[in-house]
Amino acid sequence: MFRSVLQHPQPWGSVPQNVLLRAARGPPPFKPCGNSITFQRRVQLYPLDAIAGVDVGGLTASAVLDFDESEASTYCGSEGQVLVRKAPENIAKNGKKYFIHTFGCQMNMADSERMAGVLEAVGYECSQDAGEADVLIYNTCSIREKAEQKVYSALGKQAKRKRDRVGDLKIVVAGCVAQQEGQTLLRRVPELDIVMGPQFANRIHDLLDQANDAQVCATEQVAVEEDITTPRRESNITAWVNVIYGCNEKCTYCVVPYTRGAEQSRRPDDIRREMLALGEAGYKEVTLLGQNIDAYGRDLPGLAADASGRRAWTFTDLLRHVHDVPGIERIRFATSHPRYFTDRLVRACAELPKLCEFFHIPFQSGDNDILRAMKRGYTHERYRAIIDNIRRYMPDASISGDAIVGFPGETEEQYLATEQLVREVGFDRVNTAAYSPRPNTPAAEWDNQVADLIKQDRLNRLNKVVMDVATERAQRFRGRTLEVLVEGPNPKNPRQAFGRIRHNKLVYFDGDGKELRGKLVMTRIEECHAFSLFGSLVEVVGTRAAAPGTLPLQPPPLLAAVPQLPRVAA
């Protein structure tokens, strides 16, 4: 279970499933099942040694056999399962503070909120100043080399601070860089206390306990634990809700499957319960998150059959399952994979009034040969058909995407196909990037790499095309009165309030942002930029029973009856 950096993990063999291992020193640590955490200490604890009560290298292990099966199931499950345990209650403040610096995507933001919730549940307080914190957490992104270098830059400064500090400071590197680099990080920055992959976000406190005795490297692919506490959310109006962790795709450029592991879907009722709690707490908008969110449910039993005929939940089933949660006015989701974006999903989005008319669907390239080399699993014609279908049902929908330029072997003609696709689709936004070779990915080893100067030139040109297209698309909002969910005062102009329309564009208007925060208002749009709008307040509408009339066309009826899904009571 616990192993040294010099040893290989020992197979579990015939160890009973209802054995919960713990170290005798200090409080019970993280309790994994069938996986391992590495401690930077040259000792080794095998499961059979633990059962025998052997003292190994100063860590006396014991097997806890006197608990019932319900407690065992709290911690142990098959690989790929999302586990559940109860949150601690009535925890007093412990006088310690934490600080979290988040790099990267929405998934990382959600993970940071979960870590913050776990720490506050055991008595930590949030610090706005890294210099005052007892625990520093860097939640990292490795999607591109530039993001990775930012992490090392920040670590260099904090490592010096730790060397100079009197007292106990723990430095944690979490997220995708941690998962990717593992023990290399501990060797490169010996001041680190914990290196932990994103699958350990809910176990941060257990790992901090272990770090009192040794450096901890927790990067094994384990089952993701169901949220055990309420996350400390950055907003009290909008919230992230994870629905599926990991990725099963094999894109040749992407490190995410390596850093976040295989897909693990949360149970539908757990997602619904979290949304019910958010609605009761006054949240108005929820964004459902997943690396490939429309692949949700393939590992869950359910009522609908997938393409292979196996009975499984689909993401469409989930949307219908959570749509009626009281208090939640808007539902968004990201990120979608074109391979799983079905007509059934499009029709559900058009029919369910809380679903916003905004879709983030990465396309990566407009050339089929490049898409094939990337192993994306679709053609640019298929991508266009998806967008056409969305606009068939929701002509006003906003579309955003991701694009990579300078992929190995990309010619000028192939790059121009990406430009053409951006113009033809008419994106409201595109996240662009020059290809960055990542460790453990096939494309990084290919010998047809594109020169950096060419990549940068193509990136600059594509950004100009994106800006022109987005600016033109934004003009359709001029003169219209649109619903805005107010998020607060404009940080740059306190006389203005700001919020988002259903199409996910920011809107700024004169008004009291503090007073209007969390309310739905109607705003007349007067000025349109590529990624933001400016207008004037028309009226405060509070809440609504259904979405405004932004869908000019009624979709055709479903071809088959919608399954009657079980409900968690409100």
Image: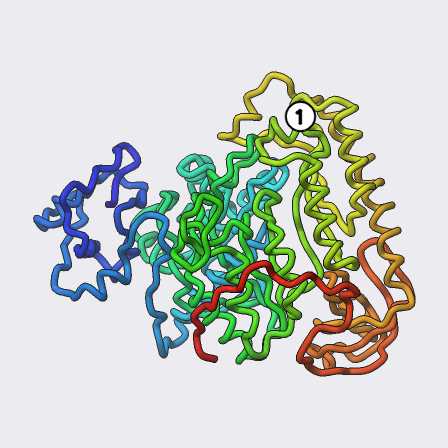
> Percent position (x, y) of residue 53?
9, 50
**Could you say which is closer to the camera, residue 383 or residue 557?**
557
Label 1 is placed on what type of residue?
Answer: Asp
Q: Residues within 10 Å of mark 1 (few under 14, many from 20)?
A: some
Residue at figure coordinates x 51%, y 46% from the top left: 160
Q: Which residue is disc 1 drawn over?
A: 369
Residue 207 point in image, percent of width and height = 35, 54
Looking at the picture, the colour scheme in use is rainbow
* Rendering quarter of residue 121: bottom left
Determine whether 303 is above or below 185 in the image.
Answer: below
Q: Position of residue 67 (x, y in %)?
A: 15, 65
User: Disc 1 on helix, strand or loop?
Assistant: helix
In the rendered structure, the answer to whether residue 430 lies left or right of residue 373 reads right
Q: Is residue 276 above or below residue 492?
A: below
> How many labels, in total?
1
Front position in the image: 365 or 44: 365
Q: Is residue 186 above or below residue 131?
A: above
Residue 99 seen: no
Quarter of the image with the N terminus is top left
Q: Residue furthest top?
A: 447
Front residue (pair 516, 313): 313
| Residue at point 77%, 67% (across, down) | 550
Q: Nearer the viewer, residue 376 or 225?
A: 376
Residue at 84 percent across and 40 percent down: it is 465
Q: Position of residue 147 (x, y in %)?
A: 61, 42
Is 14 positioned to the left or the right of 232 in the image? Answer: left
For image coordinates 83% across by 50% down, the residue present is 470
Residue 276 placement, left or right of 30: right
